[in-house]
Image: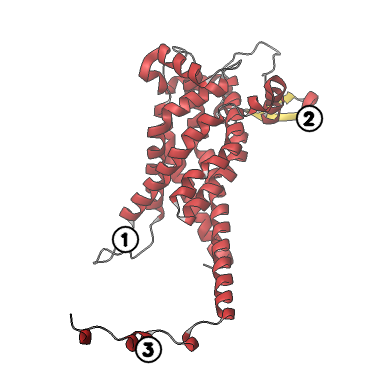
């Protein structure tokens, strides 16, 4: 190639921006500050909206979760299926019965306790708010590593709340003698007794299985939601995204995300429920071996029907709550 066809050094230098065209230090600093403020505000909104979504998920999905946990933790033959769990729970405890029990030894007052299909609901209500808040903050950031590994610190929050929830959910199965009180008065009493029996290790039992469930489960959850959301978002003639997703489409994508989350991790959840409900000092290996001996591969899937039934409405409610919370904050604070 001849030298005449190559750009000269003078032409290259002349094409570069001059010193006067470059932004000043003050302009750069101002832009960095504005970008940081915008990112921080967006993160706070996603954090708050995630908390709202978590509460919606619990309120809608807890009865299904109770049925799932009772099927997972009951011995073979105790229940004939999910409908049998519901029937016997409602007959014995009511849909959402509130009763007064003397907890004076713990709280120095009479306290009302809610059970029935919402037994143990207080633990996830307290625990899921920060869990979903961090998860949706990671989703807003848009980094798959953040979304997946946010499950690691969240396990420190969710594992003890899961342990409390499971124990409160299953204690209603026991037929009490006249005048006999349940073993646990409330969530605080569960933690107190667990700590007394086995220290902090007992309170956090099942943490490894909670992490094993929530890590891949969270990744599948948000990946599925994002995929379906993109498929359902209106597009122009050239295939570019041209509009917002309707609330119906948001709920559809959320429900599908919930199903996608449970399918690969349900056996892990069964092991977790067994570990957290067992008396004594069970091990992961011993729990897995016991399940296999009791029914082979199928023994790892009791309660999958209620879990799938829960996944659609609970996660549709989650994403609906998140979207409505975002819209409310946009109206209050500006888009």
Residue at 60% x, 33% y is 161
Do residues under tags 3 and 1 come within 8 Å of each other at their CB atoms?
Answer: no
Above or below: residue 228 compared with residue 97: below
From this viewpoint, which residue is outermost toward the right?
A: 108
- The number of numbered badges drawn on the structure is 3
Q: Which residue is mark 3?
A: 14
Residue 216, compared with residue 108, is above or below; it is below
**What separation in Å lies between label 3 and label 2 (alpha carbons)?**
80 Å
Provide the residue designation for mark 2: 107
Please determine whether, in this image, residue 139 is positioned above or below residue 312.
below
Q: Is residue 189 left or right of residue 81?
A: right
Q: On the image, numbered disc 1 is attached to which residue?
A: 234
Sequence-earlier tag: 1 or 2: 2
At 52% from the left edge and 52% from the top edge, which residue is drawn? 137
Q: Secondary structure at mark 3?
A: helix
Mark 3 or mark 1, which has the lower sequence index? 3
Report the residue at 41% width, 54% height from top: 247
Helix, strand or loop for disc 2: helix
Where is residue 298? Give x, y as percent: 37, 19
Q: Is residue 119 visible?
A: no
Say which of marks 3 and 2 sits in front: 3
Relative height, residue 68 to residue 29 (above, below): above
Measured in 3D between alpha carbons, the distance from the residue under mark 3 to the one under mark 1, in whole angstroms, is 45 Å
- 51 left or right of 183 in image: left
Graded by Cα atoms within 10 Å as few (under 14), some (14 to 19) or many (20 or more), the crowding at tag 3 reads: few
Considering depth in this image, is 109 or 235 the residue closer to the camera?
235
Residue found farthest to the left: 1
């Amino acid at each position: 190639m001849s030298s005449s066809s190559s750009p000269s050094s003078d032409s290259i230098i002349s094409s570069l921006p001059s010193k006067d065209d470059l932004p000043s230090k003050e302009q750069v600093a101002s832009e960095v500050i504005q970008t940081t403020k915008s990112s921080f505000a967006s993160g706070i909104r996603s954090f708050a909206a995630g908390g709202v979504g978590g509460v919606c998920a619990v309120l809608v999905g807890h009865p299904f979760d109770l049925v799932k946990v009772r099927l997972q933790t009951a011995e073979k033959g105790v229940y004939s299926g999910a409908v049998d769990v519901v029937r016997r729970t409602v007959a014995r405890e009511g849909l959402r019965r509130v009763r007064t029990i003397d907890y004076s030894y713990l709280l120095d007052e009479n306290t009302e306790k809610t059970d029935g299909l919402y037994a143990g609901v207080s633990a996830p209500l307290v625990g899921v708010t920060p869990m979903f808040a961090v998860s949706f903050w990671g989703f807003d950031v848009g980094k798959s590593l953040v979304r997946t590994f946010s499950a690691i610190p969240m396990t420190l929050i969710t594992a003890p709340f899961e342990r409390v929830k499971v124990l409160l959910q299953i204690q209603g199965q026991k037929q009490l003698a006249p005048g006999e009180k349940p073993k646990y008065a409330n969530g605080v009493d569960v933690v107190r007794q667990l700590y007394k029996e086995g220290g902090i290790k007992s309170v956090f039992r099942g943490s490894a299985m909670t992490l094993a469930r929530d890590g891949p489960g969270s990744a599948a959850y948000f990946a599925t939601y994002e995929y379906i959301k993109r498929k359902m978002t209106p597009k122009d003639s050239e295939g570019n995204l041209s509009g917002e997703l309707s609330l119906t489409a948001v709920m559809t994508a959320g429900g599908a995300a919930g199903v996608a989350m449970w399918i690969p991790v349900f056996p892990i959840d069964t092991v977790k429920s067994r570990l957290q409900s067992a008396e004594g000092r069970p091990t992961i290996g011993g729990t897995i071996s016991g399940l296999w001996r009791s029914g082979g591969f199928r023994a790892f899937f009791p309660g999958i029907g209620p879990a799938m039934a829960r996944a659609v409405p609970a996660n549709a409610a989650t994403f609906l709550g998140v979207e409505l919370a975002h819209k409310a904050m946009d109206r209050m604070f500006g888009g």
